[in-house]
Image (cartoon, helix red, strand yellow):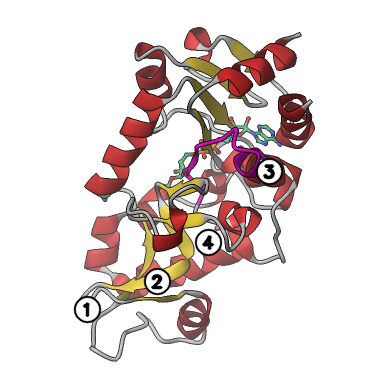
Amino acid sequence: DDLERLADAIRRADTAVAFTGAGLSAPSGVPTFRGDDGIWERFDERQFASDRFRRDPAGFWTDRVALHRAMFDEEYEPNAGHEALAAMGRDGNLEAILTQNTDGLHGDAVGAGGERTSDGEPDAAGETETTVLELHGNSRRVRCTDCGNRRDGDPIVERAAAGELPPTCECGGVFKPDVVLFGDRLPDAVLRRARSLARESDVFLAIGSSLVVEPAASLPRLAASTGATVAIVNLEPTPCDGIAETVLREDVTAVLPRLRELTVA
Ligand code: OAD
């Protein structure tokens, strides 16, 4: 069947790449952005735009605390989908995980041995490990807009929640969540690395993403245009379904563990 053929393609591939979105973390209790219960039904994207941050950092942080609570308040952990991708990486069947998610769950699943980077540069230990490339940054960190230092985000979010608006660094600079905001460009190095992995891939697996925003909308096409087999795992149709060899409209936690089993069978 479809899944067996996909597993076979992954096994034969020199380079298989997974590209993930909010649907992968939905079974972990992190809400998706679009759809009826989506974050953008409850919040206005413009509240979190980079020009809002510059104009009104205090108001931005007030809204950011609410967003943070809506997205990450529960104890959330990697689900069977994250674990299956991490296992495929350890098996040597998955070169890289490119993610739009900022929840840090791929890093948790891959564990300390894996390469985790948001800036596209390999960590020292990361040579042969699965690359986790966080295209939109990581919500668990903040970055000072003046000195550039990165910091664990939770205590800073708590400071904002307690009324420090906006939270500031010792250097006096304002902290910003270490994520790509609307109106921010993706860091060049990250985008370059994502594109080159898409081009290099023989199998490109898009998982749990509506594939409507950039670069999500164009990475599967780029992969297909350079000869990759594209497969899509998503509950709803996407604009890229037409270029995909395989489209599986099923829950990630059902598909991915089965897929992993088949790749090692
Ligand atoms: P979306 O919310 O746009 O899409 C999530 C997709 O996952 C939907 O098409 C669902 O059908 C699907 N889905 C939900 N649960 C699923 C499950 N259990 N199994 C399989 N599929 C499931 O999320 P993204 O595509 O990730 O950007 O959104 C892309 C970007 O838009 C986000 O990174 C964010 C947002 O604005 C920034 O914050 C910069």
Task: Check disc 2 and report its element: helix, strand or loop.
Answer: strand
Label 3, label 1: how many angstroms apart (C-alpha)?
38 Å
> In the image, which is nearer the foreground, mark 3 or mark 1?
3
Compare marks 3 and 2 and give the one earlier in the sequence: 3
Q: Which mark is residue 142?
A: 2
Q: Position of residue 43 (x, y in %)?
A: 50, 52
Image quadrant occupied by the N terminus: top right
76 over 4 or under it: above or below: below
Q: Amino acid at mark 2?
A: Val
Q: Which mark is residue 147?
A: 1
Compare marks 3 and 1 and give the one earlier in the sequence: 3
- Residue 24 position by quadrant: top right
Label 3, label 2: how many angstroms apart (C-alpha)?
29 Å
> In the image, which is nearer the foreground, mark 4 or mark 3?
3
Q: Amino acid at mark 3?
A: Ala
Label 4, label 3: how many angstroms apart (C-alpha)?
31 Å
199 over 63 or under it: above or below: above
User: Residue under circle 4?
Assistant: 67
Residue found 53% across the figure and 82% down from its top = 158
203 over 58 or under it: above or below: above
Q: Which mark is residue 87?
A: 3
Front position in the image: 97 or 177: 97
Compare marks 4 and 2 and give the one earlier in the sequence: 4
The quadrant where ligand 1 appears is top right
